[in-house]
Each structure stands twice: as structure tokens, then as C-alpha cells.
Amino acid sequence: MQATKSRNQIIPAIIFLLPGFALFFVFFLGPLLYSLRISFFNWNFAHPDRSVFVGLQNYITQLKNPIFHRAVINTAVYTAITVVVKMVLGFLVAVLLNQKIKARSFFRVTYYLPVITSWVIVSLLFTYMFSGQDGLVNYFLKDVLHVIDKDIMWLADPILALVPVILVDIWKGVGWTVVIFLAGLQSIPVELIEAAAVDGANRWERLVKIILPMMRGTLVFLLVVLVLGGLNAYVPFQLITHGNPMDETHSILTLMYRATFQRLDFGSGAAISYLLTLFVFLLSFVQLKLLRKPAGE
Amino acid sequence: MKRSKSLFKFVTYICLTIGIVIVAIPLWYMISTAFKPQTMVFELPPAIWPNPSTLLNFTKALTTDHFGLYFWNSLKVAITATSLTVLVSSMMAFAFARLNFKFKEPLFYIMLLGMMVPPVMLIIPQFVVSHWLNLYNNLWGLILVYVTMNISMQTFLLRGVFENVPRDLEEAAMIDGGSPWTIFIKIILPLSGPGLAVVVINSFLYSWEEYSWANVNIGDTMNRTLPIGIALFQTEHLTEWGQVFAASLVALIPVVIIFIVFQRYFVQGISTTGIKG
């Protein structure tokens, strides 16, 4: 019986998987491998057959390129700050929202509004708020809080330009981590927490000894997804800083975009994206190893 | 005990309200700017609500620059891409959750690769493929790539959902001679509403707001989508923020509708997908 069953299901399996895998091969796996090939060539887009094989040259050039180094640092700083802040804030808000409080769905929906607002729109909005002259942020710092005495030219400074980029990501992203944490919190059996309360565990002890360990899966998932998202930052950098001033505020992917579509150096662009992918794979692997459930669980 | 509890509630409300204010200020600033006459756009302190307020930004933004056309293009792309994503990824998820076949595990892991590789890094080769297949400057070029970039994650989510559907129902249907297709349509899909709602929200949001690929694959004005239109509009009308945000607000309408319709399933849906402790 079991044998007939598995034999019967090969045909349906093919039918169910075919549309997805067809797309996956044409637009994902194929391009992924093709891009590896491009990265070894001085690629000629108009006449690919005239491309010149250069081996690892594109990679070496990038690894020696100070603009690339700068982009790596920018991306790393951006990722580290946004991931930590979004996880901490998201967890706090989720814990607060996971009580019996009034207007809970109002809070939940409002926190989620920035998530559904598109990247292009929020990037423009933060550009506007961080305008050097007459911007809302400068007004607030100068005329309301009096912590600065003249306007800050946020976007003209290679370091300060990262501030709106980082803040927009946090502002837009916290709502999503809240929802994922809430889903995790709701899967913890209430009886377990109540039993601990009866045994005299206070709020803090319940959090550290029961809730956090039970949320391990959620934490790992969020960490991996958020780090991946951070390393792939593109739109906020592209629309807020444009890499200015002096190409000092690129993320890795805006640099890739510049190499490819502005300088038409497809080989270097592909090399940059492969360097990023390699790093992402290594990092995801390490994260999953480190955070794997301890043996016996 | 009782007192510490009500104190905690009080602190909760304070913290949540501060959070709401931080979330609301930029949004409010955007909305009020959209109703400001150009002379008030850089006025400080910013008026909570502009006086006089105007609808001129909306009429101007909507009538210049083919904005209506961009809106329509985005709608076509997002609706088609969302429908295809739901169909294709639920079919794959069904196969991975319920059917027995050779190489099931390795195939599943290959497909998960799609979650590990950043969409933007594929832009170069996808650009080349798009030229080969005559999809350059074509909305189908956007739709097919959006579906592809979504299916790994959504298949992964839906496999978790489908695995939670009780098997008894399905075995009963199988004894009655139901094919996998009937089981999929009649049993699995109807019982997975909240999970499917998550997939709809995810893929609609993605296709509605996608910028990087659309920016590369669309060269012709007539085929632009909204994110491209709005970003270009800002570079061409540098200080006309009122119009930029009027256009942005109109662009947000479909997303807000989708979200309001599906949001009540949202947290519930995510907990059924198996991303949890």
C-alpha cells in the first residue's frame, strides 16, 4: 500500500512543482550561475562574445578599491545598529502589547503603518525631514531642544549622512519585528507563565527564564532575516545619500549598481555582488551554527 | 501585587503612546505637507494643519507626468504577481508538505536558496535574461521576476501552514477517491485562510513597492510603475515636496486597503506558519 502510494505521487509532484521550479530556474538559479561567469570577464554587454576573460581580476580590483572598503564599512555599521535596535525595541513593544490592554489592535495597526509604506516614499520623506535648511529635524534640535546652535548639513557629511539612512530603517522596520515577536509570544502556553507566577517568579524572572528560552526559534529567525536585509540595503542609500559626498556613503549594493549601470562595468558589478553573497552565506552559516538548539532539546 | 500590576499597566500605556507619537510624526508631516501650498512647504515651525490648505498638489501631481498611467501599471503588476505567487507557491508548498517523491528534501533546500540570495544581486544577470526573452521594457518582465523572488519565502511559510492541517480529513477524501488536486483545492486551501492572507500581504507589498528591478528593466515612460514615477518626480521637481507627497499618499491607498482587509489574520497567520519558538 505504502509503495503504491509513493509511486502514484511522482506525477502529481511534478505537476505541482513544475511552474515554480520553471520560474526558479529561468529567473533565479540560471541568473545566479550566469552572474558568476560574468564576474570573471571584462564583460561586453552589447556583444557578450567579445568579452575578455580576466580571471579573478574584477575581484582583486574591488578588494583593493577604497570606495568598496568604505561601502563595506557603511553596510556593516548600518546592519549592526539597525538589527540590534529593531530587535530590542521590537521585543519590548511586543511584550507590552501581549497583555490584556485596551486599544491593542489600534496600537498594533499603527506600529505596522510604516512597514506598509513603501521604501521609496519613506526614503524621500526622511530626505525632506533631514534637509539642511528648514528641515524638521534641524528645527527640532535647534529651536525646540536647543542642543545645536546652527543647522546641520546632514547629507553633505559622509558620516552624518548615514543617520537618516539608519533611522529610516529602524522607523520602518520595528513594526515588523513586533509582529513576528508577538506571533512567537502567543505560541508560549499561558499556563506555563501562570504556573511560574504562582511559584513566585517575578516579571523579570519569567522573562529571562521562560519567555526568552521559549522564543529561541523566533530570535534566530529574526536575526538571520534582519542581518540579511541589512547587508542588502539598497533603496534608502540610493535615494537618500546617492553615495554622496565623494562616493563615501555607498552601501555594497548601491556601489554594485553604480559599477554596472552607470559605468557599464558588468564584470565588476557581478564581482561585488558575489563578494556580498559569499559573505552572506558564511555569516548565515555561522549564525545558524552558533544559535542552533543545544543538544538534547 | 495588585498595585504593581496597575503601575505596570500605566507604564505600558505611556511607553506605547510615546512609540505611537514617534511613528506618527513623520507620517503626519507627510500628510500635512501634501495639503500645503508651495509657499508653506519650508515654513517653520511646521503648522499642524496648513492654513490655508489646498488640494492643488493632488490635482497637479495626478495630471502631470502620466501619474495615472503609473498607478494603473503598478496595479496590473501587483495584482498579477500576487495571484501568481499565491498559486505557484501554494502548489509547491502542497507538494513539499503532503506528497511523497524522490529528492524531496534536496529540492526543498535548493528552493530555499532563494531566501539566502539578495534580489538586488541578481539584477545584472536578470537584466541579461530579460533582454534574451524580450521582457525588457515589458511589465511581464517585472511580474515574472517578482513572483520568482517571492516564491522561496512564501513556499517555506505555506509548507509550515499546510503541515498543520489535520491529516484525517485528507485521508477520508483519499478513500473517497479524491486526487491530490481535489485535496489541495477542497481541503488544504480552504483551511489555510490566515496563512494565505500573510502570503497575499507579503507579495502585494513587495510587488507594489519594488524599485530596484523596475528601475533597471523599464526604460520607456509608458511602462513605468509608481515607485519609479515618484522617485523620478522628486529628482525633477526638487523642492515641490507637496506634490511628491500628494502622489505618495495616492500610491499608499491600495496598500492600506489590502492591509485593512487582511490585517486581522495577520498575527494569527504568522503563528500558523511555524516561525516560532
Image: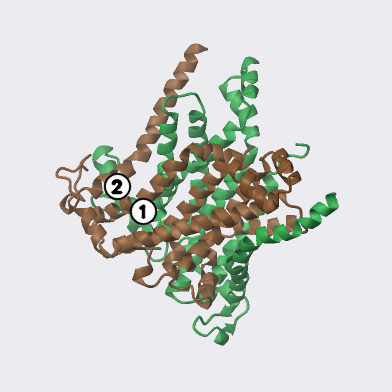
Chain colours: A green, B brown
Mark 1: secondary structure: helix
Per the image, the residue denoted by label 2 is: B30
Q: Quadrant of residue B260?
A: top left
Q: Position of residue B5 (x, y in %)?
A: 49, 17
Q: Chain of mark 1?
A: A
Q: Nearer the viewer, residue A104 or B123?
A: A104
Per the image, the residue denoted by label 1 is: A121
Q: Residue at x 45, y 56 (%)?
A: B79
| Residue that sits furthest to the bottom in the current view | A50
Q: Position of residue B202 (x, y in %)?
A: 50, 50
Rendered-image quadrant of the C terminus of chain B? top right
Instruction: Check disc 1 and give the amino acid type.
Output: Ile
Q: Are marks 1 and 2 in contact (CB under 8 Å)?
A: yes
Q: Nearer the viewer, residue A278 or B213?
A: B213
| Residue that sits furthest to the top in the current view | B2
User: In the visual, does B25 lie left or right of A13?
Assistant: left
Distance, label 1 to label 2, CA atoms, is 10 Å
User: In the visual, does A103 lie left or right of A25?
Assistant: left
